[in-house]
Image (cartoon, grey):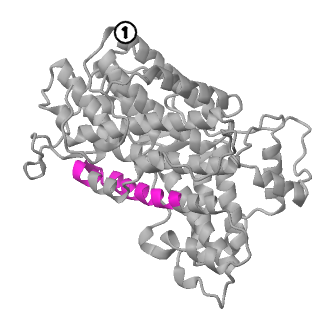
Amino acid sequence: MQSWDQARKAEQQAGDSSMSGVTAQLPLSIPVPEHVRQGSFHTFKRLPNRSNANGLSEETNIYTETRMLQDQTGRLLYIGDASTLSILQLIRIIVENTAGSEMGSPFIDDPKRHRILENIIDFPQGVRVPTSLPDKETADVLIASYFTNMQRSAQPDRAELFFRSARSMCDPGAGFEDADFWSIQALALMTIYMLIVSKRNTAYAYLGMAVRSAYAMGLHREETMRDVIFNPMEMRLRRTLWKTLFILDRFLAATLGRPTAISEDDCSCDMMTGGGALDRRVISGLELDHVHARSLDSCVETCRVIGVTLKVFSRRKISTTKVQEIVDMSRNWDHVSRTQWYRRQSGGGLADPAHGMAALHVNLLSLHSLILLTRQLFVMHNWMLVEERSGIKKSPQIRESPMARFSEACVVASYRTIKLARSAWEEGYLPRRNPFIIYFIFAASLVILMNQFSSLYYTNEYMQTMSDAIAIVSYCAEIDPQAERVLDIITRFSQVVSKWTKGHTYPAPLLSDDFSCLYSQSARRE
């Protein structure tokens, strides 16, 4: 087998030659030379002063697959190491080196593997922009039901028609140098809309503008919250907007593998952790939605964990000691994904679907933060087993290492992600076009499929779980281009997994049904 760096370098030369110049054009499908069909991780560093009792290093370089992917217009866009798209390419390399190019072909030779979906929306001839917008009463109803009713399929796309019409009347981006509070709110909403219509790069740009404007207006500092300047309602709105920007910033940074726009070192701690109880105390007579308020604060706490994880990626090194430190920052992964903050009707249904969506976002984001934190160790664990089974390297007591504990937690979190999405789907409040849910399902599905491919951990829930994942994404793919692309990827991968596992089975330890592996030092044996 060739070295991991040789395989990766050859793949970049063949498929990512665009790294050397931004004007290069990528073909739809690029053959990989036969001499790079095999490879091995060899950068696993052995540090005598950072080793565990089993002799395995606690620190290693992060295996990177930084990519330049081409959108529909031919632009080359940077996708960093933390992105699921980069992990996807690492998985393709492992599958190819394990199963070979012929068996892995549907997945590893995906004709769209060098592209990123940045959707282009065109209107039929005769459609005029701007068009009349809904009246305020109608708009208020649409906004109130927004997150539980994202099921657009009309032609022409009325949401895009309204968006372009509103932007033509008053574009907050056009007057960026004179941005006011309303324009920051508008840019935040435009960021969310761009995510929904599969324009992640545009969303990243809009968010950057919103954050810079928010800095200029002092939204990041608690000292600006003075009652002689702002009334209680205005202070609550400022805190809520800043927390929203923070969540969007961490989500986009993790999604695209790019630097964050907000540095917590520049922010007042109270802006992230405080304000909730204060708002409820000072705004007398105002009905507050406590479920959404708690959900927002929980998402902020999770995003702080994601921010620490992204710093690890930026240093290109990861250690089990550092991962454990981050795990200890948030010891509620098992608790949060089992907790319901919303009321149910006597018949079992939701009293308010919006509350169900809020809780779903909180739980899925929390689980994804754990997947993001442990996914590199999961990939390393897979490859070390591949090398051990092929006889290339002997990894003594690999299943007893700290790395294995975090690898298992990654798989547990992935299974639980699909279960939560399935519950929302069965209860009828899962929207068909939600970029956050689709991304979380995508990341979880890749881990579940890779675990099954490598026989890392055994569970009898695999078939049902992947059937649920594919059914949910198929349901969303009817109107969501991003879901359609995700469906194509996981379907191709599942086909390869089915073919490979028919003739290749290995003994594997039983997968835990909780996150006790995160806090237990006990060994796991086959």
Picture quadrant where residue 326 is located: bottom left
Q: Which residue is nearer to you in this view: 3 or 289?
A: 289
Q: Please tell me whether residue 417 belongs to the stretch shown in magenta.
A: no
Q: Is residue 189 left or right of residue 446?
A: right
Q: Magenta region: which residues?
A: 298-323
Q: How many marks?
A: 1
The crowd level at tag 1 (other Cα within 10 Å; few <14, some 14-19, many 20+) is few
**SS of the residue under disc 1:** helix
Q: Which residue is mark 1?
A: 502
**Residue 422: in sight, yes or no?**
yes
138 or 318: nearer the eye?
Answer: 138
**Visible residue check, residue 37:** no
On the rendered image, what quadrant is the N terminus found in?
top left
**In this view, 282 is above or below 34:** below
User: Where is residue 309 shown, x and y percent of the image?
Assistant: 37, 54
Say if 283 sits above or below 129 in the image. below
* x and y percentages locating residue 280 in the rendered image: 63, 74
- Apparent side of residue 399 relative to residue 62 in the rendered image (left or right): left
Amino acid type, residue under disc 1 in the picture: Lys
Nearer to us in this view, 338 or 107: 338
Which quadrant of the rendered structure holds the C terminus?
top left
Q: In this image, 409 relative to 162: left or right?
A: left
* Residue at x-position 52% and y-position 26%: 489
Name, please, the residue furthest toward the front.
346
* Residue 251 image position (x, y, % from top left): 52, 52
- Displayed quadrant of residue 16: top left
Q: Residue at x 43, y 24 (%)?
A: 461
Residue at 35% across / 59% down in the picture? 329
- In the rendered view, would you say 313 is above or below 413? below
